[in-house]
Image: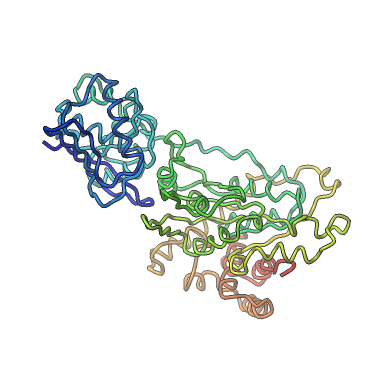
Amino acid sequence: MVARVSTVAFLGVEVVEVDVQVQISPGLPAFSVVGLPDKAVAESRERVKSALHAIGLGLPAKRIVVNLAPADLLKEGSHFDLPIALGLLGAMEVLPAGEVAGYVALGELALDGRIAKAAGVLPAAIHASALEKGLICPAGQGGEAAWAEGIEILAPDTLLGLVNHFKGTQVLSPPAPAAQPLAGSGADLADIKGQETAKRALEIAAAGGHNLLMLGPPGAGKSMLAARLPGLLPPLTPAEALEVSMIHSVAGTLEDGKLLRRRPFRDPHHSASLPALVGGGLRARPGEISLAHLGVLFLDELPEFNRNVLESLRQPLETGQVAIARANAHVSYPARFQLVAAMNPCRCGHLDDPAQACSRAPRCAQDYQAKISGPLYDRIDLTVEVPALSAADLTLPPPAEGSETVAARVAAARHRQSERYAKAAEAGEVERAPRHNAEADGRLLEAVAAPEDSGRELLTQAAERLRLSARGYHRVLRVARTLADLEGEPAVRRPHIAEALSYRRVLPGR
């Protein structure tokens, strides 16, 4: 007899059904796992045998074959432990094989029979719902799986508890959906004294989802400003929370099985490798740009990142996704992130201070800033200088406006954008409504951000004088549209174009 249990494999955030087939037949004692398993799956034999021994069961002295179908798909991860164990229990007639076959199972087994957490429970639950099957997952991730509607979810602590449930001697309570608390980051704009221009740029970036680069000497407050951006952004909508949490679930970074409610803020160190930032590696996993999906990716000390790492951001910044091609895998991950970067004007950081600048100025600034390519800089909507603060600035009283006040204006501007683009989608002007102005493109952008005559004239003159690319021209329009939304203006006027152009200046030393 062949016992069968359903589980899943992951190609990016895509879920692929895997059929676990277990056969116990006469022959020399052996336990084989076939179907292109990786090292973690092959080692599941020892974990499964120990877990069964812990609940008082031993494997028969026969030939045991576990086949993971489709056999030509690479199986990775320890979550195959639980479905293999359930298949064995079905083949040994400890559990009714027909009943176990009605579930999708995943989980790692400890040697004492406990069921440990596994990556990918949320997309597996949604996949099980589509198949009209139940889901068996670790107890710590039941709240994550409960967001999939209309399915039975079993979230046992141990393998013994699951066996008792199927035998009717114990009842597993259905888990309740769990979400992380909607709490602020604790960092408030009121903590930052001075830097009014940078605060204005930060508000614009938050309102329209624009990319931002802050340029200034060490200690000017660039990192402090970036850390306060999450407090200005609106929380994730339910659909967005599910989309973002699926990526974090596959990556295994969803804390306590709770869905994310606040937008991600990722700040990798400048020593991060290319696979760490964009994803991939021996076992393809989401990178920082995917973990920052619908949130913020903050790159401090931008020129210190490896050149290849920075250049790898160009395609995801345009398309909103990253495709990873490897010899053994070809996967894609969502990567619609907002880039916020900070950098010093030169290596020593004191280019504008003659008393502290090095003797190589301005040549040192040109060499340092040349580490950022023109095409990457062209994708940055807002560039703002963050000057050094004087002692007098630090003695000023706290600013009157804090994050709560600015966040209210940002929320109002985002609401205007969502209403506008929802109407455009209903009218059939676009297939999918953009979430904010930074995603508007093509005819839709020309329709919603068309400036008045005086503004169009200014933009045309500036585009010729500054030699703006087509991308740069459209990004100026997007920023101008956001400025109008912040003021509640239906049309883009000349002052909006002028302010948007002021953030589009060329870096010193270019």
Q: Residue 34 at x, y = what percent?
A: 24, 43
**Quadrant in the picture for residue 231:** top right
Q: Residue furthest right?
A: 355
Vertical position of residue 204 compared to residue 233: above or below: below
Vertical position of residue 179 compared to residue 271: above or below: above
**Position of residue 116 in the picture relative to residue 497 (left or right):** left
Residue visible at 30% across and 25% down in the picture:
50
Foreground of the two, 274 or 300: 274
Residue visible at 83% across and 43% down in the picture:
395
**Quadrant in the picture for residue 334:** bottom left
Can residue 118 be seen here? The reply is yes
Q: Residue furthest front?
A: 28
Foreground of the two, 12 or 27: 27
Can residue 153 be seen here? The reply is no
Q: Residue 243 at x, y = what percent?
A: 41, 49
**Position of residue 345 in the picture relative to residue 129 (left or right):** right
Q: Quadrant of the C terminus?
A: bottom right
Residue visible at 37% across and 30% down in the picture:
116
The total of numbered circles placed on residues is 0
Q: Residue 229 at x, y = what percent?
A: 61, 49
**Position of residue 40 in the picture relative to residue 274 (left or right):** left
Q: Residue 14 at x, y = what percent?
A: 34, 51
Q: Quadrant of the N terminus?
A: top left
**Position of residue 399 in the picture relative to residue 270 (left or right):** right
